[in-house]
Amino acid sequence: MSRLTLTDAQRMIDAGIKEATRIGQPMNIAVVDDGAHLIAFARMDGAIKASIDISARKARTSIMMNMPTGDLATATQPGAELWGLEQTSGGLVTFGGGIPIIRDGETIGAVGVSAGSVEQDVTVAEACLSAF
Amino acid sequence: MSRLTLTDAQRMIDAGIKEATRIGQPMNIAVVDDGAHLIAFARMDGAIKASIDISARKARTSIMMNMPTGDLATATQPGAELWGLEQTSGGLVTFGGGIPIIRDGETIGAVGVSAGSVEQDVTVAEACLSAF
Amino acid sequence: MSRLTLTDAQRMIDAGIKEATRIGQPMNIAVVDDGAHLIAFARMDGAIKASIDISARKARTSIMMNMPTGDLATATQPGAELWGLEQTSGGLVTFGGGIPIIRDGETIGAVGVSAGSVEQDVTVAEACLSAF
Amino acid sequence: MSRLTLTDAQRMIDAGIKEATRIGQPMNIAVVDDGAHLIAFARMDGAIKASIDISARKARTSIMMNMPTGDLATATQPGAELWGLEQTSGGLVTFGGGIPIIRDGETIGAVGVSAGSVEQDVTVAEACLSAF
């Protein structure tokens, strides 16, 4: 398996910052490796502090569940199958903004973005991925 | 009271792995004793990492509540009697996949399975129990 | 990078159990991947419960520090350079019994053993590694 | 009070990476604001994972205590005045590598470096500060 490098992570963060600037929403952006350990992080000036943890946790959730965090939103609603999932594994995030980074069919890391609306967070996370 | 042995636990895990292989869904399988302390655990290749904690927590919940975790799904919904239960005892899991192990009318341990759909998790947990 | 499989982990645990049986000291044995996530675990009948966590934490520490846990014993003493290190990274273990698993120069996992004297723990951990 | 910007933080991290490369020791480098909240972080390829938390915690400790972490080493020894301090405030680090960032007499942030010897960590942290 190939590993995600710091250079990869920083390039993705730079792309995310560029997109966040374009849409006018300062963001927190975290990139983790395939074990959910942080490689790089940036908080843009003016981005809310709660999203430091949320962005890192979105990236971590994407690794632990091996899926985008947005895919968990429906399944964890009251009455749905995974109701209460967010309590497990040290705390998972169940709304969009975390996306796995896949190379040659293997998940080698994840990016997590937070501070805007969920739609904005996803847009910026996808911009990060596009730079990979 | 008779105690669950490592040999018991490993035999149950082997049976679970066999069933998980049969249905084509890699699983995390945990077996705990009557004090909710881990005896044996296995993560099949390709099973998601979040389910390491979830499987162990399902087994632990089964001991702490002395019932299958699936029995908690309805009672912990918004407006239902045990709303918020999952916050207690260090974090409980309220969807299926954890089942107590009962011998001669006494709960001597529990098995927890996670990584597939809840239905798959329950199927594999029952396969573990069948080997006991 | 090659990955540690469940088969690898179980073979190492079996070898550890054999050595622990030979020296007459029941043990807890944990094997984690290169991200410190549990792959397999076994608690032998009669092994103390505290060592469930200690064995897993020794394996985790070996990954996080990329060294045997025994190498931390001197450096974390009062007055030494890393005094207080054990408080970091969610709690590290600074006595022997955790050893990284290295293949082709890369750390791909770690084993942690606990329940006996430190010398016994290290002996059993080395027996696990020998089976790799 | 003037605030530390992401541009400031990234410039300091770049300087730290340059120095770490020069001395041949991959590092984790964290920069926090005056509230101890993370602004930017980088883990160089090959740096140990335990130091993700340690570097951030060193930066955090520097803010919480308003001093370099190395100044705590003596005071927290057995028998010394602040014995046990590292248990407080969610866990402080009492060895060198965390340094406050001061502008016009005011602490506006801190840098934390970890993964090498304490001496190397301090050297790289000072290189970060020099770029400020």
Image (cartoon, coloured by chain):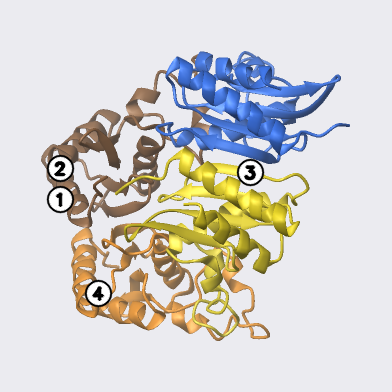
Chain colours: A yellow, B orange, C brown, D blue
**Disc assigned to residue C132:** 2
Residue named by callout 3: A42
Say which of marks 1 and 2 sits in front. Answer: 2
Q: Which chain carries label 1?
A: C
Residue named by callout 1: C11
* Three-letter residue code for mark 1: Arg
- Residue C52's x, y, as percent? 36, 49
- Residue B109's x, y, as percent? 34, 68
Cβ atoms under marks 3 and 4 closer than 8 Å: no
Distance, label 1 to label 4, CA atoms, is 20 Å
Instruction: Label 1: state its secondary structure.
Output: helix
Residue D20 seen: yes
Q: Which of B95 and B61 is in front in this view?
A: B95
Q: Residues within 10 Å of mark 4 (few under 14, many from 20)?
A: many
Distance, label 1 to label 3, CA atoms, is 42 Å
Quadrant (top left/top right/bottom left/bottom right) for the N terminus of chain C: top left
**Disc assigned to residue A126:** none
Cβ atoms under marks 1 and 3 closer than 8 Å: no
Instruction: Label 2: state its secondary structure.
Output: loop
- Residue A58's x, y, as percent? 56, 58
Distance, label 1 to label 2, CA atoms, is 7 Å
**Relative to D116, is A57 on the left or the right?**
right
**Relative to D79, is A129 on the left or the right?**
left
Q: How crowded is mark 3: few (under 14 residues within 10 Å), some or many (20 or more)?
A: many
